[in-house]
Image (cartoon, rainbow, N blue to C red):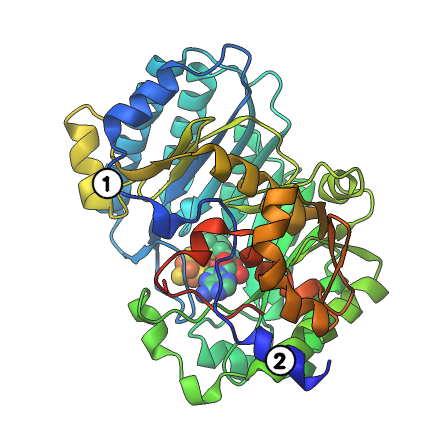
Amino acid sequence: MHNAALIHAERAVPRYTSYPTAPHFTGAIGPQAHAGWLDCLPPQASVSLYLHVPFCTALCFYCGCTTKATRRPEPVAAYAERLAREIDLVAAGVGSRQVTHIAWGGGTPSLLGPPLLRRLGSRLAEAFDLDRLAEYAFELDPRETDEPLADALAAMGVDRVSLGVQDFSAHVQRAIGRIQPFATVERAMRQLREAGISSINLDLMYGLPHQSARDIRRTVQLATLLAPERLALFGYAHVPWMRANQKRIDEAALPGAAERLEQSEAAREVLLANGYVAIGLDHFARADDMLARAAASRQLRRNFQGYTADRADVLIGMGASAISRFPQGFTQNAPDALSYSRALDEGRFATVRGIAFTSNDITRGALIERLMCDLEVELDPSTLADAAPHLAGLAADGLVTLEGQRLAMTSAGRPFVRLAAAALDHRLQGQAAARHSAAV
Ligand SMILES: C[S@@+](CC[C@H](N)C(=O)[O-])C[C@H]1O[C@@H](n2cnc3c(N)ncnc32)[C@H](O)[C@@H]1O
Ligand code: SF4
C-alpha cells in the first residue's frame, strides 16, 4: 500500500448499513408514520424481524453498540414485558404475516435468560407465520453461554449464532476490558453445536489498543481452529464523543492508519489461506455457506446488522433503538430503555425519529448497497456526473477504476469501499461535517 492511499484511510465516513444514514433521521417521523407504514405493507411483502436487548453485565471499553450495564434482573424482566407488548402491537398492525428471518441482537440478549427467551419466542411464533423462516439468528457473549441457554435457543428454533471474540491476546483483552480466554469460546461453541445449532459466526476486531498485526494473525489462526462457518472482521470504530465507555480506551495505544491496514490485510490473508471466502467489506464464510452463495450470485444485502442473505422487503425492528425499514422510509425507536418502556406502557409505538425516502435516496441507496456488497456497480449518468469529481482521487491512487459507467474497487482498494460509497452519497456531499469513524 503506498503512502498516498493512507491519506484516504484516515477520512471519516459512514459505514453505510443504511441509506440515508442515521444522522439524517429527524423527529418529523414518529409513531403515526411507523403505524401507518405497518398498516399499508403490501400484502405479499416478506418480513424480517429484529429484536434489540440493550443490556450487558458490564460494558467492554470499545463497545459502540446501544447497551447499558446492569447486574440486576428486574430491569431486564421489565424490558422483556415491553418487548412482548411491542410484538403484539406489531402483529395487530400487520396481521399474521409470513416472516422469513428473525435476529436477536444487543447488547447481550441472552441476559433475558432461558425462561423469558422461551416465552418471547412462543409469542413470536403465535403472532407471526414462521413456516417459511429461512434463518433465526442470535448474538451471544461466549462468557455468558451455558448448556441450558444453548438448549433454550435451539428449542426456539435458533439456527445461527454470532459470538463476540475480538482478539485472543491477553494484553489486548486487558486493554479493552474484556477477559475471555480461548477455552471460553471453545466451550461455548461445543455447547451450541451439541444443542444442534449448526452455524456459528465469530466477531473479530482489528485496530484495538496495543494490538499488532502479529496479535490479529494469531487470533485468526486460533479462530479457524474452531471451524466457525462465518467470521466478521470489524475495524474498531473509535467514537468516544458518542460512546462514553470508549473514553476508557488509551488513545495513545491505538494503531495508526498504516497499522490498521496492515492488520486487516494480515487477518484476511490467514482467512483466505484457511479456505474462507471474502464477502463485502468485512465478512468471511465457508464457500458453501448461505452468505457466500448469496455473494457469489450477487444477492447479498446490507442492513443494520451488516451483510445478510435475507432478502425480505421489510425489516421491523423491535426494542430500544431498533430501526425499521419500509418501502417508504426508516423509523427508529427511542434509544434508551426508559423512554421506550414509557411509550409501550401507554400502548403506542416508541418511534422517535426516521426519514421518508425521496426518489433520489432510493436510487442512491440501491447503488451504494450494490457497491458495498459486490464491490462494483453500474452507475446511472446523473450519479456518475455527481460522483466523478469525488472518485478522481481514489482512481488516481489505484483504489477504484471507472470505465464507462462501471465503478469497481481494485483489490488494493477493497478496504476503502466506504469511501467510494461516500462519493455516491448525495446527502454527504451537501452536508455540514457529521462525525464518523475512520474509513479503514
Ligand atoms: C452486540 S456485540 C456481540 C454480542 C455480545 N454482546 C458480545 O459482545 O459477545 C456486536 C459486535 O460488534 C462489534 N463491535 C462492538 N463495538 C465496536 C466498535 N466500536 N467498532 C467495531 N466493532 C464493534 C464487536 O465485534 C461485537 O462482537
Ligand atoms: S461488545 Fe457485547 S458484551 Fe461488550 S459491551 Fe458491547 S454488546 Fe456488551
Regarding residue 96, the answer to whether it shows in the image is: yes
- x%, y% of residue 64? 41, 61
Residue 6: which numbered mark, if any?
A: 2
Mark 1 is on which residue type? Gly
Q: Quadrant of the C terminus?
A: bottom right
- x%, y% of residue 353? 28, 40
Task: Establish if 87 lies above or below 406.
Answer: above
Check mark 1 vs ligand 1: CB closer than 8 Å? yes or no: no
Mark 2 is on which residue type? Leu
* Residue 259 figure quarter: bottom right
* Residue 36 figure quarter: top left
Q: Is residue 423 left or right of residue 114?
A: right
* Residue 241 figure quarter: bottom left
Regarding residue 307, the answer to whether it shows in the image is: no
Residue 27: which numbered mark, if any?
A: 1
Kindly identify the residue that appears in the image at 21 percent across and 25 percent down: 348
Task: Establish if 166 lies above or below 368.
Answer: below
Could you give the CA–CA distance between mark 2 and mark 1, rounded to whole angstroms?
38 Å
Q: Nearer the viewer, residue 114 or 159?
A: 159
